[in-house]
Amino acid sequence: PVLNTGMPQGIVGSNPTPSARFFFEKPPSSASFVNPMFPSLSIRFKVLSGFGLAIAAVAVIATLSLRSTRSFIATAEWVSHTHRVLETHEALLRHLMEAESAARGFLITGDELMNDFFEQAVSEANETEADLRKLVSDDPDQLERLKTIRKRMDRKLTALNGLIDLRRKQGGEAALNRFSAMGQEGSMLEIRA
């Protein structure tokens, strides 16, 4: 026998289960619907809360992005600074090698044009060393290394000037013999170390 409950039946001869009733019952109207998690909150409050959370999330993401971008820019500036220091250091070494090559050329040939190249390379080396000093002025360790380079540079340039003077006074053979006796001791390679 079928019981008459006033609700649609599931299988003939049985009452619907509680889960089946959910599908057959009329949904409550929106005015009378109450969320079981937040029974006393109005729809307006819920919508405003949702927008507020979304805006807060965007603000947090924007703040994190800004911090990350600032950090990236600072790092990029330091990398750029490091590249400028390395390039300036290489330019200094190049000018010193040019000075040494021009001095050797003068010792061999006695050509004053080679002496002019020497003087120009020395001038450029001094300017580049001053630029390098400005670039590393914020780092005491680098300034100390640069002082060492400057001492070696001055010692080498003084030796080369002495050889040039010897070439002018005593001739090429005396200057070349002295240069050969110096060997690697006065080489610009020690400045690179």
Image (cartoon, rainbow, N blue to C red):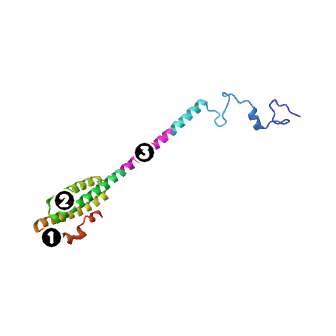
Q: Is residue 77 inside the magenta stretch?
A: yes
In percent of width and height, residue 133 lies at 26, 55
Residue at mark 1 to residue at mark 3: CA–CA distance: 64 Å
Contact (Cβ within 8 Å) of mark 1 with mark 3? no
Question: Dot 1 corresponds to which residue?
Answer: 173
Query: Which is nearer the N-term, disc 1 or disc 3?
Result: 3
- The residue sitting at the left extreme is 169
Q: Is residue 87 left or right of residue 55?
A: left
Q: Is residue 24 inside the magenta stretch?
A: no
Label 2 sits on a secondary structure element that is: helix
Crowding at mark 1 (Cα within 10 Å: few <14, some 14-19, many 20+)? few
Query: Which is nearer the N-term, disc 2 or disc 1?
Result: 2
Label 1 sits on a secondary structure element that is: helix
Quadrant location, the N terminus: top right
Instruction: Please tell me which residue lies in front, 4 or 8.
Output: 8
Q: How many marks?
A: 3
Residue at image coords 30%, 58%: 142
Residue type, label 3: Thr
Residue type, label 1: Glu
Q: Is residue 48 left or right of residue 15?
A: left
Residue at mark 2 to residue at mark 1: CA–CA distance: 19 Å
Q: Please tell me whether mark 1 or mark 3 is closer to you in this view.
A: 1
Q: Is residue 134 left or right of residue 40?
A: left
In percent of width and height, residue 53 lies at 54, 37
Q: Is residue 105 above or below residue 61?
A: below
Question: Dot 2 corresponds to which residue?
Answer: 118
Question: Dot 3 corresponds to which residue?
Answer: 69
| Quarter occupied by residue 23 | top right
Task: Tell me which segment is drawn in magenta.
Answer: 58-78
Crowding at mark 2 (Cα within 10 Å: few <14, some 14-19, many 20+)? many
